């Protein structure tokens, strides 16, 4: 079984986590003064979501990543239900940093409230997750002022001392901010975008320099094409798969398909295998809404990483499109 360590925390987890955004159900990002838009993955079946989490556990996955804003707390609720009685067998990561209105099913950002609200936010997440502590508590405001993030870090250290969280991290793609935050005594991870098409060498170096885990969102599945459509309550309905950038990405996917599907892998399994081969600190967290999706993703662990030569072949193809 592929294993990883969550950075300096030394918490041992499966090399694959499950990203729980999709099981939160419909919700709306409604920043005051801006046009609201759907931010979930459309309708869900809570019973199926719980079955899917149990399937992941049965296949050796012990790391689950959620957030307070996914489904306006609903994802945390489902994770809590599914893991009730199993808490000692899993690592739970969740995120904070937004204004979550459970009654109106809306979320918006307000950086001025992050430090003021963090103690209340953690208690709300603990309630929804039905747990006494959170293993990895991650700031979910990627563009937060790094100076304020250091003030926030002091509060997070207090929450560690109080036993409400064990470790913390930051979900951000801003390398300089992550580097400043990474030195925190109980900072264990940075969550950032990384996939077969998009590498982030600088952020991976931050993880290496500070002994952190990299938690990777944005996993490539190869299941969409230029005609793909999603329901209006699904955030992916905002993606135009026929625009030039999307068309280029789809062409890259086609060109690397044979490499990723080697040895009987599916495209999704090959994409996970690529990340494992790229960097042993990385823990991809593909999303899911069904037992079938979990079974496919977790099944990637039986194949293991791609070979070094396969990684180089993929990178050579991707590089052609960046010229």
Image (tube, rainbow, N blue to C red):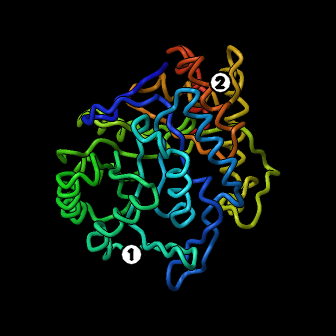
Residue at the image point whose x is 52% and y is 73% from the top = 102
Work out whether residue 161 can be spotted.
yes
Q: Identify which residue, 41 or 249, lies in the foreground.
A: 41
Which numbered marker is on residue 305? none
Q: CA distance from mark 2 to mark 1?
A: 41 Å
Residue sitting farthest toward the bottom: 33
Residue at numbered disc 1: 110
Residue 188 rendering spot, x and y as whole percentages: 29, 41
Residue 56: image location, x then y, percent? 58, 34
Q: Residue furthest right?
A: 227
Quadrant for the C terminus, please: top right
First in sequence: mark 2 or mark 1? Answer: 1
* Residue 323 seen in render: no
Mark 2–mark 1 CB contact (< 8 Å): no
Whether 154 is drawn above or below 219: the answer is: below
Relative to 17, residue 14 above or below: above
Residue visible at 43% across and 73% down? 99
Report the front residue among 51 and 236.
51
Provide residue 21's location: percent of width, then percent of height: 56, 53
Q: Nearer the viewer, mark 2 or mark 1?
A: 1
Where residue 36 sits, quadrant-wise, is: bottom right
The residue tagged 2 is 260
The answer to whether residue 106 is left or right of residue 213 is right
Give the class, few, some or many, for how many residues have Cα within 10 Å of label 2's Cα (few <14, many ≥20): many
Q: Is residue 155 left or right of residue 63?
A: left
Q: Position of residue 159 (x, y in %)?
A: 22, 57
Q: Which residue occupies 30% across, 37% down? A: 212
């Amino acid at each position: 079984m592929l294993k990883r360590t969550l950075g300096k925390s030394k918490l041992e987890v499966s090399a694959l986590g499950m990203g729980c955004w999709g099981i939160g159900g419909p919700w709306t990002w409604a920043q005051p003064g801006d046009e609201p838009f759907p931010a979930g993955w459309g309708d869900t079946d809570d019973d199926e979501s719980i079955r899917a989490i149990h399937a992941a556990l049965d296949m050796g996955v012990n790391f689950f990543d959620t957030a307070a804003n996914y489904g306006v707390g609903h994802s945390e609720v489902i994770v809590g239900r599914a893991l009730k009685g199993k808490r000692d067998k899993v690592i739970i990561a969740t995120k904070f940093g937004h204004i979550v209105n459970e009654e109106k099913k809306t979320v918006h950002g307000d950086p001025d409230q992050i430090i003021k609200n963090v103690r209340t936010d953690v208690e709300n997440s603990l309630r929804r997750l039905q747990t006494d502590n959170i293993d990895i508590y991650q700031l979910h405001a990627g563009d937060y002022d790094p100076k304020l993030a250091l003030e926030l870090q002091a509060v997070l250290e207090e929450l560690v001392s109080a036993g409400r969280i064990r470790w913390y991290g930051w979900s951000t793609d801003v390398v300089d901010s992550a580097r400043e935050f990474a030195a925190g005594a109980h900072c264990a991870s940075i969550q950032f975008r990384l996939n077969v098409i998009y590498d982030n060498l600088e952020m991976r170096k931050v993880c290496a320099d500070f002994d952190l885990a990299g938690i990777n969102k944005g996993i490539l599945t190869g299941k969409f094409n230029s005609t793909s459509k999603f329901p209006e309550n699904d955030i992916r309905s905002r993606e135009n798969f026929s625009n030039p950038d999307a068309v280029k990405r789809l062409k890259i996917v086609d060109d690397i398909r044979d490499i990723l599907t080697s040895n009987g892998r599916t495209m999704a399994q090959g994409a996970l295998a690529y990340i494992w081969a790229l960097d042993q600190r990385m823990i991809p967290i593909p999303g899911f809404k069904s037992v079938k999706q979990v079974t496919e993703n977790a099944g990637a662990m039986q194949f293991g990483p791609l070979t070094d030569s396969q990684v180089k072949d993929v990178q050579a193809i991707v590089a052609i499109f960046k010229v």
